[in-house]
Amino acid sequence: IQWMLNHGFSLLKNPILRPLETIEQRDALINPDGTEAEWPQADVIIGNPPFLGDRKMIGELGEEYVIRIRGLYKGRVPGGADLVTYWFEKALAQIEATKAKRAGLVATNSIRGGANRKVLDRIGEIRQIFNAWSDEPWINDGAAVRVSLVCFGNMGTPPILDGQPVTAIHADLTAQTLNSSPGGDLTQAKRLAENAKISFIGTQKNGPFDISGELARQWLKLPNPHGKPNSDVLCPWSNGMDVTRRPSDTWIIDFGCYMSAMEAELYEAPFFHVIEHVKPTRLNLRRQFHRTRWWLHGDPRPALRRAVADNHRYIATSAVSKHRLFAWVDTRILADHALIVIARSDNTTFGVLHSRFHELWSLGLCTWLGKGNDPRYTPTTTFETFPFPENILHDPAPDTRYSAIATAARRLNELRENWLNPPEWVERVPEVVPGYPDRILPKSGFEAELKKRTLTNLYNQRPAWLDNAHKTLDRAVASAYGWTDYTDAMPDEEILRRLLALNLARAGQSPPIAKKPSQECPS
């Protein structure tokens, strides 16, 4: 009805909906006895199924119900998929059983990636997507989301994507166009064994462990009964906005991965804060670890800590952001789960990650979130699939072998840092804990201007010096790939085609990556 009104069509208004005796008010997925719900036979299936993200399903539908439907559809719908994907699978089953010919369904645009896309992968294997709109605004009662509209089943007509004829529509709702060369289906990209155990999601708090820098500095001066300092369990903390905007001077209480309550309580002020503010939020959570180890972070990420322990810095990027930005972070700063951490300290890796090639790859394999439709970066789909220039990740001295990349990356970072924190505008104050990163404070009169100096604002403007620094970096990375024909004008499609070919060639020589086991307690 919204679409018709917006496109000049008239409607019957008395009433808009006429009596429909065939509508049944019942669960479309599962029967009361636990068996799969049956759908009536029809020529076509058209619908706008409920949008409910994977992480919200238990809270909205109840744990028992979610466990039942995930068990019932196991092997057909991934456990981490959104609720809407079950309607896609059901419609496909109807078509396979010759109880329908075609289906056209609406989903959030996150169906194009991650666990959700597995359902479209399955549709592409059995049938075909013949018409789709990959990313459209959807506004209803003031709520704005981005949606994908997907039609699949028995073809009969040439495929059309976003209103344009194409040769084929891929599961991520991109397409091989009529004039493009084959080989650009990024859904075929594989995770590479050589990229494993390098990128990590930051720590998950599951409680208000974070405190202001001002309060932390007060606690750092306090004595404890065992004679140890509070700096053992207090450290600066960083999330996505600390990278894309200005550092927030937030600290966090961190008793590590395995400290007992008897050990933790000897750090009096931090432990009392956790008892008062964190413990009440943890006693009724689902996971036993969260309830019984309430003084520890919900997921302290021991593997991440081990990976960065021997380095003085790591590379971080906000999991969701408008621009794919990477920044250096001091190892003594604990990363939040809103950051993706790459456990590398060399300029060469930093340079490749900030090149045009990795940015295109990450945009091609990411999912999209929020009203801003911002890309989401993940360790698995966007990092572990990316084919770096040969052996960079395991070269003991990549900055020497690929000196042009290292030099260009170092220059890019220096220029950005000088823009973010002009020496004339800031002063660097030593932290109260020796060895911790200096605090960067605005000089008097420059407070307002310094607030505007963020990486997001810089890349929104993209001044000539920044653009040229990136182009210099891109040429150095292209040379490392051996692409002697590279120019700034090389089409994005050609770059992605080459990267995909490299990914698939390496995947054929790599052993499969084992799935991580599900664990109740982090290890």
Image (tube, helix red, strand yellow):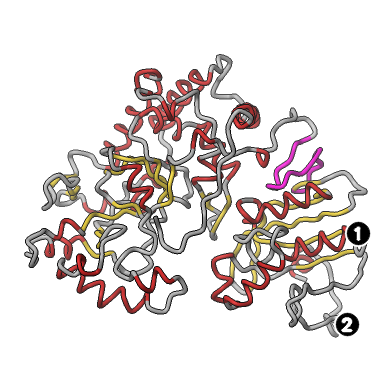
Residue at 69 percent across and 62 percent down: it is 74
Tag count: 2
Mark toward the viewer: 1 or 2: 1
Check disc 1 and report its element: helix, strand or loop.
loop
Q: Nearer the viewer, residue 364 or 61?
A: 61
> Distance between the Cα atoms at labels 1 and 2?
22 Å
Nearer to me, 513 or 308: 513
Q: Which residue is mark 2?
A: 20
Q: Is residue 86 above or below residue 195?
A: below
Q: Residue at x 74, y 69 (%)?
A: 2
Q: Say what amino acid the circle numbered 2 marks.
A: Leu
- Magenta region, residue range: 162-177
**245 lies left or right of 76:** left
The residue wearing badge 1 is 101
Q: Nearer the viewer, residue 139 or 169?
A: 169
Q: Is residue 175 magenta?
A: yes
Question: For numbered disc 2, what is the local secondary structure?
Answer: loop
Q: Residue at x 35, y 69 (%)?
A: 207
Establish if 418 lies above or below 277. above
